[in-house]
Image: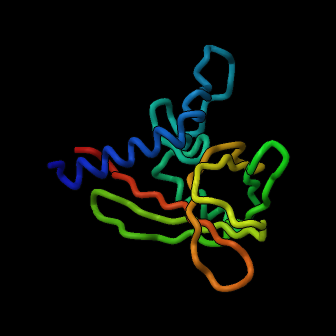
């Protein structure tokens, strides 16, 4: 039987590897004269959810993007406009951090719980796994929940 700590570490590593795989292919360290990343930018080997943003800074970056528009790439012909309407703190311990992003859209029909490519003018394209969230009103809401270890001792 696995310990809770090991389970959380393996689960968050697997989930992030699936969602961040395309991001791992992007690197500034190709020997060119590219501008080095900022001190708070993601470094090679860091786990990321948003391109170039270390996981430890993701919630802060999402708060900066609150009420901004994202596009969800539904298929080859449909872009769905979504608004980031909430960034909620969840449980935080000395070992783990949890938070949730909530997106709102009026697209019909409702999206299935799945992985979708998102686009944002400042972040570029990145994949996120979304799940339906129940909220009052006529719009559809989708949640992205992040639960990760702060460090592995």
Residue in view at x 56 percent, y 53 percent:
129
Q: Which image quarter is the C terminus in? A: top left
Residue 60 locus on image (x, y percent):
55, 60
Q: Residue furthest left?
A: 1
Pick whichever, 20 or 122, lies toward us. Answer: 20
Q: Is residue 108 above or below residue 148?
A: below
Q: Where 62 sits versus 77, above or below?
A: below
| Image position, residue 45 (x, y; %) | 45, 31
**Farthest residue, direction right:** 77
Relative height, residue 39 to residue 136 (above, below):
above
Q: Is residue 131 left or right of residue 136?
A: left
Q: How many marks?
A: 0
Q: Which x, y percent locates residue 125?
A: 70, 43
Q: For the view shown, which residue lies furthest in the bottom direction?
A: 136
Residue occupying image coordinates x 57% and y 72% = 133
Left-right relation of 103 to 90: right
Q: Is residue 59 left or right of residue 142?
A: left
Name the residue located 49 percent from the left edge and 30 percent from the top edge: 44
């Amino acid at each position: 039987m696995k310990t809770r700590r090991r389970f959380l570490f393996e689960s968050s590593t697997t989930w992030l590897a699936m969602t961040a795989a395309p991001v791992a292919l992007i690197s500034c360290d190709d020997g060119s004269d590219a501008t080095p990343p900022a001190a708070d930018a993601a470094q090679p080997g860091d786990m990321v959810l948003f391109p170039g943003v270390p996981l430890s800074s993701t919630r802060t970056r999402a708060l900066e993007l609150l009420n901004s528009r994202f596009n969800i790439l539904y298929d080859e012909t449909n872009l769905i406009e979504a608004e980031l309407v909430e960034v909620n703190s969840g449980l935080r311990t000395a070992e783990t951090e949890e938070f949730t992003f909530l997106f709102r859209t009026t697209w019909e029909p409702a999206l299935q719980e799945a992985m979708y490519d998102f686009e944002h003018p400042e972040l570029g394209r990145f994949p996120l796994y979304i799940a339906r969230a129940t909220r009052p009103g006529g719009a559809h809401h989708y949640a992205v929940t992040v639960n990760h270890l702060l460090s592995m001792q």
